[in-house]
Amino acid sequence: LSKFSSDQASVGGDDLDDASCATTPTLVSTRSDKEVPITAFQRYYHKIQHKPEVNMALFPHATKVIIDGIPPGWVSNLDQLKHLEMFQMEKGCILDINELFFPSDKMITSLHKSNCVETTEISSAENVKFQSEERLPYFQFDSLSKLRLSNCAIGETAGLRGRPKNKPSSDSFFKGPTRLPPMSRFPNLVSLNLSHNELFKTKSALEGLSSLPFLSSINLSHNRLTNMDIVFLH
């Protein structure tokens, strides 16, 4: 999949800010301060032209996916690809790796929150803690062996370190259950390329990789890492 170039379409005198990191398109009026009414069809046409949804559920048997220059927010249901062997994304701003690869986690978090609400109404703090530590069926890419996420502006806030266990305080369990580092959910990964990103903490770059027994190639070049001392402490 590659970002296609198209003629600038005029819809009610509006133009689109085409930034790769933008999660939602922004319409900016450039010709007149007076608002021009836009029909529902024009809005729909504008959306599919400037922010089409790449629904991976339509390709359940895909084994190789290459995405170049397409904003990650356009890609949905990536965890429907049960047979994915190679995934490559370049020139796309990844704000949250978990949202890209594991969108079904949102449903699990929602169920967890619902369970916690019910638990607080009928039981004690010890039972709340039990609910928060309950193991939930997280999806993982068992067949993926090659992963390349290059030039994707991946930084410290992209979710590489997962989410630690929550303490049973008054409101912490509402944040959801423990979330594993995303890289640990590619158990058969052989090659990982995270080059040309914005990582500057070695722990973030390597989080979850110790649980990958077949990993033989890691490319972290052109990041902002200053040392790799932590790698040799184990």
Image (cartoon, rainbow, N blue to C red):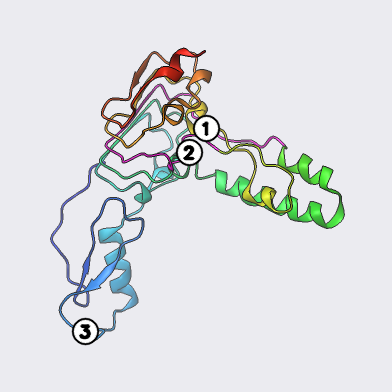
Vertical side of 8 occupied by 71: above or below: above
Residue 42 seen: yes
User: Can residue 221 be found in the magenta stretch?
Assistant: no
Magenta-colored span: 134-162
| Kind of residue at badge 3 | Asp
| Kind of residue at badge 2 | Asp
Q: Report the residue marked by disc 1.
A: 181
Is 119 on the left or on the right of 37, as rendered? Answer: right
Residue 66 seen: no
User: Can residue 158 be found in the magenta stretch?
Assistant: yes
The residue depicted at 61 percent of the width and 37 percent of the height is 164
Is 126 on the left or on the right of 197, as rendered? Answer: right
The residue depicted at 43 percent of the width and 21 percent of the height is 189
Residue lying farthest to the left in this orientation: 7
Q: Report the residue marked by disc 3.
A: 33
The answer to which of marks 1 and 3 sits earlier in the sequence is 3
| Kind of residue at badge 1 | Pro
Is 115 on the left or on the right of 150, as rendered? Answer: right
Q: Report the residue marked by disc 2.
A: 79
Query: Are the two marked residues, 1 and 2, in contact with CB atoms closer than 8 angstroms?
Result: no
The residue depicted at 38 percent of the width and 39 percent of the height is 155
Distance, label 1 to label 2, CA atoms, is: 16 Å
